[in-house]
Image (cartoon, grey):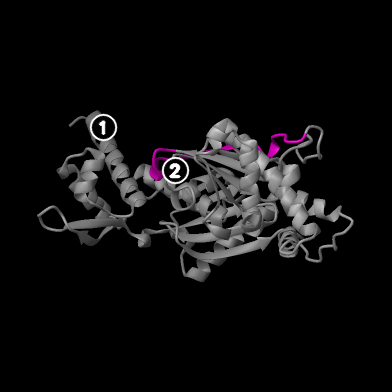
Amino acid sequence: MTLAMRHTTRDLRRRNRAALLSHIYHIGAASRVELVQASGLSSGSVSNVVGDLVNDGMVAEVGSEDSDGGRPRALLRVRPEFGKVVGVDIGETHVQVGLFDWTLQRIASTTFAIAETSLEPEAVAWMVGSGIAKVTVEAGVDPATLLGVGVGVPGAVQPTADGTAVHAPTLRWSGVRLDQMLATSVRVPLYIDNCARTLGQAEMWRGAGRGTSRSVVALLGVGIGAALATGPSSRDATSSTSEWGHTVIVVGGAPCRCGSRGCLEAYVGAEAVLSRYAELSGGRPIEAVGTEARLAELAARAEAPGPAAGVLDTTAEYLGIGIANLVNLLAPDRVVLAGWVAEVIGPQILPAVRAAARRHSLPYLYGQLQIQLGELGTDAVALGAATLPVVQILATGERLPAR
C-alpha cells in the first residue's frame, strides 16, 4: 500500500469515527443498526469503528432494546468517565470556573467576584488558573489529564500566527494574548471564544434551544450579546454572534459604553437598569454591594408595586423592542433569554417582554416564535465554554494532544 493510500485510509477511518461518536454523543443512546442507518456505512465498518471507540474508553454498551423479531440490540452510550473538561466564564462581574465530565454534567465550580477587583488581563488570568487548580483539587482530578479547557470572553477572538488575541472593549482589552498568559497554568488543549457564541451552542445542545433549527440565544449581563444558532438538529448546530446590544433603539438616547447613544445595552444592561432606578425620586437607595447583588435587591423590591416594579416594566418594554428587531430581521423559531441578568429578573419580566415583542414584531413572524428563559442556570456560560474542547474531540473522534 502506498503512503498516499495509507493516509487516505486513515483519514476515512478518522472521519467515520468522528461521525459515529458525534451521533452517539448527541442522540444519547444508539444501536449499531441505528448507526448503520444514520451514517450510511456498512455494518462491518460500523462494528470496527465502534469496537475502537469501546476499546479507547469513549463508548460503552449500556443495555439493549427490542428488535423486530430478532435478538435484542445492544445500546451504545458515551462514557462520562472518559474524561473531564473545564469551562471558564469571564464576565464583567465575576470569573466562574466549572469542571464537567465530557457529557457536560457539572462536577465542581468556583466563582471569583470582580466587584473590588481589577479587570486587568493578568489579574483575570490569575483567577482562571487559580479556579482550575481549585476545582480539580476539590474533585481529585489531575489537571494534566483534562481533555481541554474552554474560555468564554465578552469580546471578539481573533486568530494570530501563533494563537489568538482577545478584543473586548467592555473590559478595555485590545489584542490581549490571554492564551499566552494562561500557558503556565493550562497545559492541556486551550480554546477561547466569544461567550455569547458558546452559550448559544450549549443551549442548542443541552438547553432551551433543543428541537429548533433557528434560535437566538441572548446573553443578558452588564453587557448584552446574542448568538444565532442554526442547524437541522442539535448535533449539527452552529453558532455565530452579533453585536445586538449595540443596535440603536432610541434615536439620540442614553449614552452607551461603545460611544454611541440609544443602544439596547444602555437600556437593558444591568448597570443601565440600576442607574434608571437610582434616578427615580421615589426609590429607596439600593443597599447591596456589587452589581449582581444590587440587581437581586431591585428584583426583590419589584415583587410589590412601586418604583422598582416600574423600572422592570420599562426594562421589559425595551427588551421586547430589541427582540422584535431580531424577529423581523432573522425570523427565528425561538429566542432564549440567558445569562445572569435573565436568571435574576427573567421570571418577573418574561410576560411583559413577550407582550412588547408581539406589539413590535410583524404578526406572521411572531406567530411562529417562542420566547423563553434559558435552562442551564448560573453555569450556563461556563458550560458553554466547556463545549469548546468537546467540539474538537467530536470533530476528530479522539483525545487531543497536550499543549
Q: Residue at x 71, y 47 (%)?
A: 268
Query: Which x, y percent locates residue 25?
Result: 35, 51
Q: Which residue is mark 2?
A: 212
Q: Nearer the viewer, residue 251 or 94?
A: 251
Name, please, the residue furthest toward the left: 70
Element at badge 1?
helix
Q: Position of residue 243 (x, y in %)?
A: 64, 36
The spot of residue 350 in percent (x, y) is 62, 52
Please give the range of residues in magenta: 231-250
Q: Is residue 183 above or below residue 144?
A: above
Amino acid type for the residue under numbered disc 1: Thr
- Side of 45 where 103 appears, left or right: right
Residue at x-position 31% and y-position 50%: 24
Question: Which residue corresponds to mark 1?
Answer: 8
Question: Is residue 246 one of those drawn in magenta?
Answer: yes
**Callout 2: 10 Å neighbours few (<14), some, many (20+)?**
some
Q: Quadrant of residue 392?
A: top left
In reply to whether residue 343 is colored magenta, the answer given is no
